[in-house]
Image (cartoon, rainbow, N blue to C red):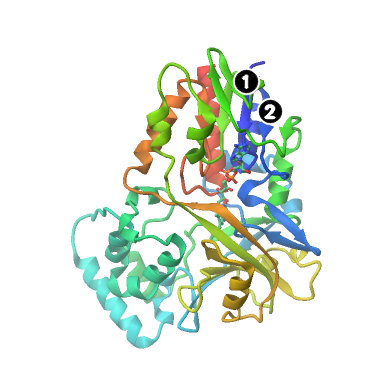
């Protein structure tokens, strides 16, 4: 059997390993002490802390759905929930997504925004946008942009929205339709099409349960094993100086490859250097106890530096075993200390009591005009050598878990074809 090394044991690496294990001798290398990457969870005195976000599962991709559910007993292991997301705007709770619930705004704002949307809907022809700001203004109008989309997105992306090209959105978010927004507001229709409108969540263990279960049966997972060097040879690769593999699947941070990858012959230096300064944002999360409510996600365009609260304690009662109250995660984009976050959450509803915190330096990839081109160029060059990039930070894609799995499926197909 040919030997394949998988670098990284997040959902991309573990899925790739599982998918390839039937045909190849697989070894997975993970620099941290636990598998999971972004979907790792931690037990805090009996409560489940999603160290980044609050991962729920959903997919519209049939192949991913079939493969994913093969690993679980859907009824026994998972709960299915309907999204109950709200926006806290000017101290009022409004249903999410805001554009469908404009009638919940005060009457004056509602009228003005509807008038603007009606004007926009009269403009004929399909519009194309160059950047994220133009897209938001053109799709929702100036008033809604300034009321909600601008402050909310500025908190998350921490960059000029005009510098974010539109291509990063393709296939990731449903494209808004002004006619539909107008009808939804006139008919007061509930939305069903949004990402995670309904979702699955493990009864116990959150997303750590997901990754641990998928990883079952993989015999060679080496944790605490950072791959610090990759030497290309005539018949494969040598990792960290002593382990030989025929092929490599890399799911780590593509920006770091220039310092660990040593090629031969065909020069990759330029392609590796071209991606070393891609921009990303980290996320700071503070895990809290909260008063009871029935919300799943609460979006926070104003009030504080935090941009949302994820009520993970509402996803499964097993997540609050150590507390009398429910638990939740308050999320900030960028680096904040525990002390700073403790101050900020005093402004939020729910009498939040902090329990723990985490800072994850890599969470949101930021696209600039030529990012996709640079990544594709590098990917193609590496694939010719038997080195595959897959995952959120290896491909610099705004993937959810299901898209990460789909990307690993595509890598498997390529490897089988090239073997
Ligand atoms: C705030 C937030 C909320 C989210 N919520 C959801 C959600 O609700 N549902 C959903 O489906 N998706 C969600 N996502 C997306 C989801 O987290 C990602 O799609 C997925 O976790 C990406 O997995 P990955 O394996 O590609 O990357 P990662 O999880 O980053 O895994 C990469 C792994 O590689 C390891 N590594 C890197 N370099 C090396 C090296 N040199 N040697 C050894 N190991 C290395 C890292 O330690 C890490 O474990 C969310 C993301 C964020 C940021």
Q: Which residue reaches farthest left?
A: 124
Say whether residue 112 is left or right of residue 258.
left
CB under 8 Å between discs 2 and 1: yes
Looking at the image, tell me whether mark 2 or mark 1 is earlier in sequence order: 2
Q: Secondary structure at mark 2?
A: strand
Q: Secondary structure at mark 1?
A: strand
Say whether residue 326 is left or right of residue 164.
right
Say whether residue 99 is left or right of residue 244.
left
The location of residue 145, given as percent across then percent down, is 33, 70
Q: Residue at horizontal 62%, vertical 31%? A: 6
The location of residue 38, given as percent across then percent down, is 61, 50
Relative to 236, is 123 above or below?
A: below
The location of residue 92, given as percent across then percent down, is 49, 83
Total marks shown come to: 2
Badge number at residue 27: 2
Badge number at residue 245: 1
Tell me if mark 1 has few (under 14), some (14-19) or many (20+) residues whose alpha carbon lies within 10 angstroms of its own: many
State how far apart marks 2 and 1 are (Cα). Answer: 9 Å
Distance from mark 1 CB to nearest ligand 1 atom below 8 Å: no
Q: Residue at horizontal 68%, vertical 68%? A: 314
């Amino acid at each position: 059997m040919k030997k394949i090394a998988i670098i990284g044991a997040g959902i991309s690496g573990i899925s790739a390993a599982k998918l390839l294990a039937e045909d190849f001798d697989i070894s997975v290398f993970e620099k941290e002490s636990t598998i999971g990457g972004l979907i790792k969870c931690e037990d805090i005195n009996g409560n489940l802390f999603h160290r980044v976000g609050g991962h729920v599962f959903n997919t519209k991709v049939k192949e991913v759905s079939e493969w994913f559910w093969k690993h679980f007993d859907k009824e026994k292991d998972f709960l299915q929930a309907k999204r109950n997301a709200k926006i806290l705007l000017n101290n009022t709770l409004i249903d999410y997504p805001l554009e469908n619930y404009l009638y919940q705004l005060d009457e004056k704002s509602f009228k003005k925004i509807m008038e603007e949307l009606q004007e926009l809907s009269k403009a004929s022809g399909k519009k194309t946008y160059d950047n994220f700001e133009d897209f938001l203004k053109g799709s929702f109008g100036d008033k809604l942009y300034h009321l909600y989309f601008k402050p909310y997105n500025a908190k998350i992306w921490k960059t000029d929205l005009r510098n974010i090209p539109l291509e990063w959105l393709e296939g990731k978010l449903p494209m808004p339709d002004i006619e539909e927004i107008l009808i939804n507001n006139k008919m007061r229709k509930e939305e069903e099409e949004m990402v995670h409108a309904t979702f699955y969540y493990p009864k116990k263990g959150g997303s750590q349960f997901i990754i641990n279960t998928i990883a079952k049966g993989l015999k060679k997972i080496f944790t605490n094993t950072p791959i610090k060097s990759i030497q290309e040879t005539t018949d494969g690769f040598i990792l960290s100086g002593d382990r030989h593999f025929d092929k490599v699947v890399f799911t780590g941070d593509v920006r770091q490859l220039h310092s660990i990858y040593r090629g031969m012959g065909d020069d990759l230096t330029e392609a590796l250097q071209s991606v070393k300064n891609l921009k990303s944002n980290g996320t700071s999360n503070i895990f809290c106890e909260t008063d009871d409510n029935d919300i799943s996600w609460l979006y926070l365009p104003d009030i504080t530096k935090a941009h949302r609260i994820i009520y993970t304690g509402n996803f499964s009662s097993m997540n609050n075993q150590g507390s009398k109250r429910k638990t939740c995660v308050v999320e900030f984009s960028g680096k904040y200390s525990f002390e700073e976050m403790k101050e900020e959450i005093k402004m939020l509803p729910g009498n939040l009591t902090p329990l723990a915190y985490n800072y994850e330096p890599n969470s949101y990839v930021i696209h600039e005009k030529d990012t996709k081109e640079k990544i594709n160029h590098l990917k193609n060059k590496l694939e010719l050598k038997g080195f595959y990039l897959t995952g959120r930070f290896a491909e610099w894609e705004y993937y959810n878990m299901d898209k990460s799995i789909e990307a690993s499926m595509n890598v498997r197909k390529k490897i089988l074809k090239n073997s």
